[in-house]
Amino acid sequence: MIKRILVGLGVFFLLALFVFGWERSVSYLAGTRRVLHAEADDRVPMQLERARIEALIEKEAEKILAFEDRTADLTGRREGMARTIQEAKRKLDAELQLLQRIKEMLDEDREEYLIGSQTYSFPEVNADALDRVAKVQQMQEALEFDESLLAELDTAIKQGRGNLSESRRRLGELRHALARMEQRNVNADIRLQVAQLVNSIASAPLSASSELENAMRNYERRVGVKENRAASRLMDNGSFRIDYSATIVTQDASAEIDRFLNATGSQRSPVSDGTPSRVSPGQVSQEAQQ
């Protein structure tokens, strides 16, 4: 799987290189990397990021402890070398004093010298003196080397202690900064919760656009329609009237009315006072059925 991804990225890079050129391809890849990094960073939970920082802090603390151990070991070596140098200086001083005494004896220019219980000739004393001079020179060179090494150790230890102090200080600052950022994170969460609550109560529950208000307006509209429909079926004097707008006519009403009027006109009897007789609704219904 990883091999396929690498091959795909290689093909994509070669295609981009062919199309856009080296500089633009590199800039596109760098921009893509930044975008992917930012997107991945946004997707990482805050708790995971904090745990990662804490793990890194502990790792750096372990490094500081290891560095402190090395500095302590170097300090121990330095102290041992300082003791060695002090001992070498003591021996060198003793050899120098002995060479001074031998020089005084050689300056007497005698054929024999009584040293302790032994008698030595001038050549023997002179050869011993030359050998001691070479030995003292070696001791001086070794002492100079040790002293230079001691100076380097002193510099390294001083620098190491300074770095150790700075690392401890910086680690402490990072720990305090992490604690402050964690408090800021908690405060930000509280602010977000408060902002959500504020937004949730920004509009009243029974606002003009609420579902209840819309339902009430729709119900009122339907009641008004019903009231208007009922009022349209009543005359001003309260008598019932037909709403012809709601009547569905399925046959030729004009022909039916002509037939009905002709039938009723032939059966109507004259009245003496000139007032037309009033036909009851029942009679009209019966005649209409005939």
Image (cartoon, rainbow, N blue to C red):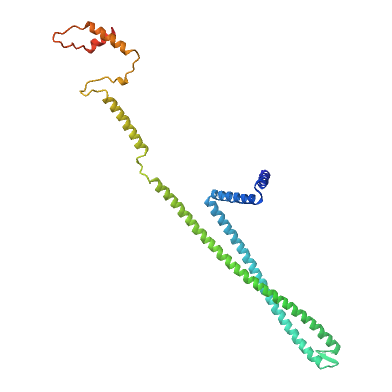
Residue 197 vertical position relative to residue 215 in the rendered view, above or below: below
Residue 249 vertical position relative to residue 79 in the rendered view, above or below: above
- Residue 288 visible in the picture: no
User: 53 and 232: which one is in front?
Assistant: 232
Residue 286 location (% of width, % of height) = 26, 9
User: 145 and 30: which one is in front?
Assistant: 30
Viewport quadrant of the C terminus:
top left
Q: Which residue sits at x=54%, y=61%?
A: 174
Query: Is residue 72 found left or right of 43 in the rendered image?
Result: right
Residue 262 location (% of width, % of height) = 26, 8
Q: Which residue sits at x=61%, y=49%?
A: 28
* Residue at the extreme left: 273
Q: Which residue sits at x=43%, y=49%?
A: 193
Question: How many labels, in total?
Answer: 0
- Residue 155 visible in the picture: yes
Residue 150 location (% of width, % of height) = 68, 74
Query: Is residue 1 found left or right of 111 in the rendered image?
Result: left
Viewport quadrant of the N terminus:
top right
Query: Is residue 276 found left or right of 18 in the rendered image?
Result: left
Q: State the image quarter where residue 137 is shown.
A: bottom right
